[in-house]
Image (cartoon, rainbow, N blue to C red):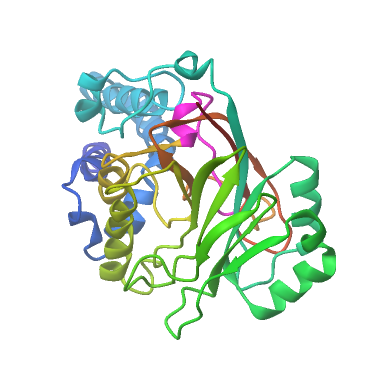
Amino acid sequence: MLVWILLGVIALWMALRYLPAGWDSFGPLPFAIALIPLLAVPLVGTLGLAALTHSRAQVWSSIALLVVHLVWSLTFFVPIPAGMMPVLSSPRQTMSSSAHANSTQQLTVMTVNARYGRADTSVILHTIEQMNVDVLAVQEVSADFVQRLHDAGISSVMAYEQLGEKKDSDNGGFNAVWSRYPATSSGATLLENMGSNTPWITLQVNNNAVRVVSTHPYSPQRSTKQWQHDIAALTQLTSGADMPTIVMGDMNSSTFHPSLRATINTGLLDSSLEVHRGAHPTFPSSWTFLPSVIEIDHVLHTREMQAVSVRTAVIPRTDHQALICTLSWR
């Protein structure tokens, strides 16, 4: 009986992935859905218990749920045909990297949550130089962090800076963007009524305009309603977009969350899914004996662009790994 109860709870937990967008903002659901990728562990446990009790029905039920979990994981490794996306509850993907084989433009971007401005600025700068990063987006920024980044020499590497407008409801700090490329326009607030303001910058990359946005949807710990609002508000960035747009940051959600998938499907792509080289978990990164297990930092972009590579990097004194992505477009 215990195994059946466990299997029932796990099956219902996994089914949360299929909730309609917006329904994932109630109660503890944002947290429960974020942990769905870890359910493979208790499923292996139930399989072991079922095998010990020689219950064939429980063994096959455990295997069936493990297969579903495995198929979901495969969405990070293989392109998914459009007709299969609703079945697998996966956001839209590009079919293959060959679609942009003749791309002539490239941009490498990096996003990192600075954890109340505590992140090691010297390591951030070293990572920028080592990975040839062109644009840096940071969340949970403080005035002290900005000063330390300047002291570390960011201005000699990225001369163009746009800080988000500070507000009392800031989600652990404000957001910011730095760039190697010249900025033709920028602003501290792009979207209204966000938990943290969204600074943006328009760059000239080889005479091509590209818009970059640093965003940090509200933590569901603070307000699940504001969390869902902030994720849904990102759809405005694809409405009538007249240039390639990159939206990156700590989004406090994964592609397992229906609200984020709905936002992606309005006209964006998730870089981690595109490269088909597995998930890129970024949180938590500050626990000594536990690797990052949840992918809540993202580089999203409009569909005329495509991710060429995605990697993570450890930054001391923050609980998020940096996410680094190279994008290409014609």
Say whether residue 283 is magenta. yes
Determine the residue positioned at 76% across, 67% down: 149
Could you say which is closer to the camera, residue 133 or residue 161?
161
Determine the residue positioned at 20% across, 50% down: 21
- State the image coordinates of residue 267 (x, y, percent, origin top left): 30, 39
- State the image coordinates of residue 307 (x, y, percent, origin top left): 52, 31
Q: Is residue 215 above or below residue 295?
A: below
Horizontal side of residue 285 vs 70, given as left or right? right
Horizontal side of residue 259 vs 132, given as left or right? left
- State the image coordinates of residue 261 (x, y, percent, origin top left): 29, 43
* Numbered range of the magenta stretch: 271-284
> Which image quadrant for residue 8?
top left
- State the image coordinates of residue 227 (x, y, percent, origin top left): 32, 65
Horizontal side of residue 107 vs 189, given as left or right? right
For the stretch drawn in magenta, the main secondary structure is loop
Figure quadrant of the N terminus:
top left
Q: Is residue 191 above or below residue 257?
A: below
Q: Is residue 310 visible?
A: no
- Count every numbered label the image shows and give the total: 0
Q: Is residue 254 visible?
A: yes
Q: Is residue 299 above or below residue 115?
A: above
Determine the residue positioned at 74% across, 40% down: 131
Say whether residue 321 is magenta. no
